[in-house]
Image (cartoon, grey):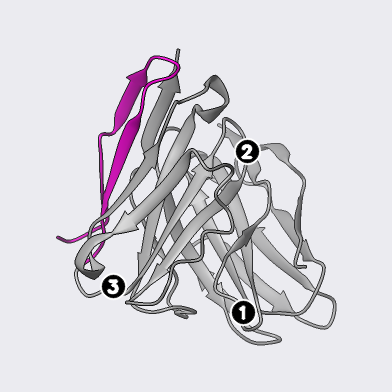
Amino acid sequence: ELKVEQNPLFLSMQEGKNYTIYCNYSTTSDRLYWYRQDPGKSLESLFVLLSNGAVKQEGRLMASLDTKARLSTLHITAAVHDLSATYFCAGSPISGYQLIWGAGTKLIIKP
Amino acid sequence: GAGVSQSPSNKVTEKGKDVELRCDPISGHTALYWYRQSLGQGLEFLIYFQGNSAPDKSGLPSDRFSAERTGGSVSTLTIQRTQQEDSAVYLCASSPRERQGAGYTFGSGTRLTVV
């Protein structure tokens, strides 16, 4: 059974700093998703990572996937206040169609 | 429509009443999911529809919960005899097909409050 764990669950940081959110998963998964959720809003798809070594970047966010370590990371470079949100990772079991979700990382970026 | 549409956006109901939540997926998307998100929590899978196949209902928390999808498009999630623990945001998502690499598109959710 696939389980997904994120850490940290809460992160407060200053603008301009770099930080990484980690997403570990327990069994083989062939795709890993990152979503963003603003307070009171729905989920916005950020990245889909489909293969070992995949790296995707959008603005100040970069996501990577290491299937051997069963680890995905979301790296924030030179954070800005607008990136404050809750970030979720989710994995999909091979031959399954559900998304198994991490608990989310609430990110607060202080000006 | 351009996105996944859910209605109502907010619903306050008395304990014991029945409620219906509606999801209108993106046109042409054959896969439709219902999730539940409690305050400050991640997402809990409820039910999955794919085309004309039998739905996967394995995530429904009790027999008070049911869902249907008519004509492979609009879906309705029904909660009978609501309880306070049913209070949550109910999210619907669709994708062109299962295991779609491009990801899933979520609706804005229905915030259900049982008083």
The subunit carrying tag 2 is: B
- Left or right: residue B38 versus residue A6 is left
- In the rendered image, residue B109, in percent from the top left (x then y), is placed at 36, 42
**Chain where mark 1 sits:** A
Residue B68 pos. (x, y %): 33, 56
The residue to which callout 2 is attached is: B41
Q: Is residue B21 magenta?
A: yes
Q: What is the secondary structure assignment of the residue under circle 1? A: strand
Q: As shown in the figure, which amino acid type bears the numbered disc 1?
A: Val
Q: Is residue A8 left or right of residue B72?
A: right
Q: Which residues are magenta?
A: B1-26
Measure the alpha-carbon separation of dots 2 and 3: 27 Å
Q: Are marks 1 and 3 on the same chain?
A: no
Q: Nearer the viewer, residue B86 or A66?
A: B86
Q: Residue flagged by tag 3: what amino acid is it?
A: His
**Rendered position, B112 above or below A42:** above
Q: Identify the residue under disc 1.
A: A55
- Secondary element at image label 2: loop
Judge left or right: residue B23 versus residue A41: left
Residue under the image location 83 percent in, 83 percent down: A68
**Mark 2 vs 3: CB contact within 8 A:** no
How far from the left and from the top, in percent, is residue A77?
Answer: 62, 57
Task: Name the residue located 60 percent from the left edge and 77 percent from the top edge.
Answer: A96
